Image (tube, rainbow, N blue to C red):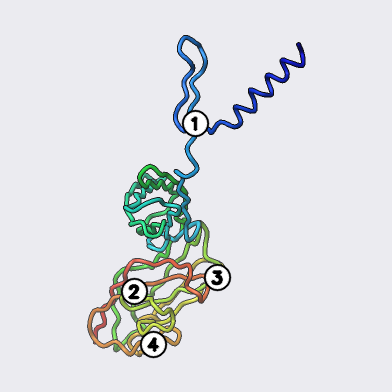
């Protein structure tokens, strides 16, 4: 009898293994007290979400989310929720099983992403770093005749939660940063002083150099005559410009 029972158990087990897994909820037979077994999500219903980086600097629209393994045509829905209370939604059209969504510029925080495409779902997360580039003023008057008497310009850089230790603070007219130091709008750069402090000081050199046209450090701009101009500062940790922070705009008025 012991051997017959064992054989029966083996036979039942073999049948169970040969039966395909159920994709809907399984309920105990009527009249029994057996538990309800929750269904497992099909592997094919999962969306894999890739991200171009684990994080991005605040105020920069650069992070790209790519939903893959999409089945069919239509638009994928992206929902992004931050621990700072910010929530936004967007859509991206599916092409060849993929949908790409560029995340708008966001403030510092940690964000969770949920993606839905028909019955498929996926998720990921990313960070917007605690970084900031601050310029001492948003308006500045430069006197062509006495530029050295102008108000000094200074600022500071916090990079991923701490003072920037290396890198450059570059100034560009109208914020036209494309091309980096090769940009025709490149005014020049300032270094950190003391080293590692996160502080930079353009002093009165800023006004003297834009009115003379030599640039803060070999810039590409001609002298500025009387008028009102707009500049923006950018911080980059190296010359590659693959990771940068921007400041608010600086309005400069040049007077005779």
How far separated are the C-alphas under marks 4 and 1? 68 Å
Where disc 2 sits, the SS reads loop
Judging by the rendered image, the residue that carries numbered circle 1 is 22
Relative image position of residue 249 (x, y in whole percent): 31, 69
Locate the C terminus and report the quarter of the image it occupies.
bottom left
Mark 3 crowdedness (10 Å alpha carbons): few <14, some 14-19, many ≥20: some
Identify the element where label 4 is drawn.
loop
Q: CA distance from mark 2 to mark 1?
A: 58 Å
Mark number for residue 175? 2
In the displayed structure, 68 sits above or below 167; it is: above
- Cβ–Cβ under 8 Å for marks 4 and 3: no
Q: CA distance from mark 3 to mark 2?
A: 22 Å
Looking at the image, tell me whether mark 2 or mark 1 is earlier in sequence order: 1
Which residue lies under the disc numbered 3?
A: 166
In the displayed structure image, the side of residue 227 where residue 223 appears, left or right: right
Q: Is residue 98 above or below residue 16?
A: below
Front residue of this view, candidates 16 and 87: 16
């Amino acid at each position: 009898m012991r051997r017959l029972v064992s054989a029966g158990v083996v036979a039942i087990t073999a049948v169970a293994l040969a039966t395909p897994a159920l994709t809907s909820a399984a309920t105990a037979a009527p009249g029994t007290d057996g538990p309800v077994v929750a269904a497992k999500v099909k592997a094919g219903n999962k969306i894999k979400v890739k991200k171009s980086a684990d994080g991005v600097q605040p105020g920069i629209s650069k992070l790209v989310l790519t939903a893959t393994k999409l089945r069919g045509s239509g638009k994928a829905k992206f929902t992004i929720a931050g621990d700072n209370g910010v929530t936004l939604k967007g859509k991206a059209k599916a092409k060849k099983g993929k949908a790409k969504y560029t995340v708008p510029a966001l403030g510092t925080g940690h964000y969770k992403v949920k993606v839905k495409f028909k019955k498929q779902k996926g998720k990921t997360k990313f960070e917007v770093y605690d970084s900031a580039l601050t310029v001492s003023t948003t308006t500045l008057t430069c006197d062509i005749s006495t530029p050295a008497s102008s108000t000094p310009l200074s600022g500071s850089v916090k990079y991923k939660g701490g003072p920037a230790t290396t890198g450059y603070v570059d100034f560009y007219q109208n914020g036209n940063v494309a091309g980096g130091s090769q940009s025709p709008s490149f005014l020049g750069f300032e270094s950190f002083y003391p080293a590692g402090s996160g502080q930079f000081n353009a002093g009165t050199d800023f006004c003297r150099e834009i009115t003379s046209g030599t640039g803060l450090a070999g810039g590409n701009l001609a002298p500025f005559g009387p008028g009102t101009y707009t500049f923006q500062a950018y911080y980059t940790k190296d010359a590659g410009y693959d990771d940068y922070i921007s400041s608010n705009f600086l309005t400069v008025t040049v007077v005779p």
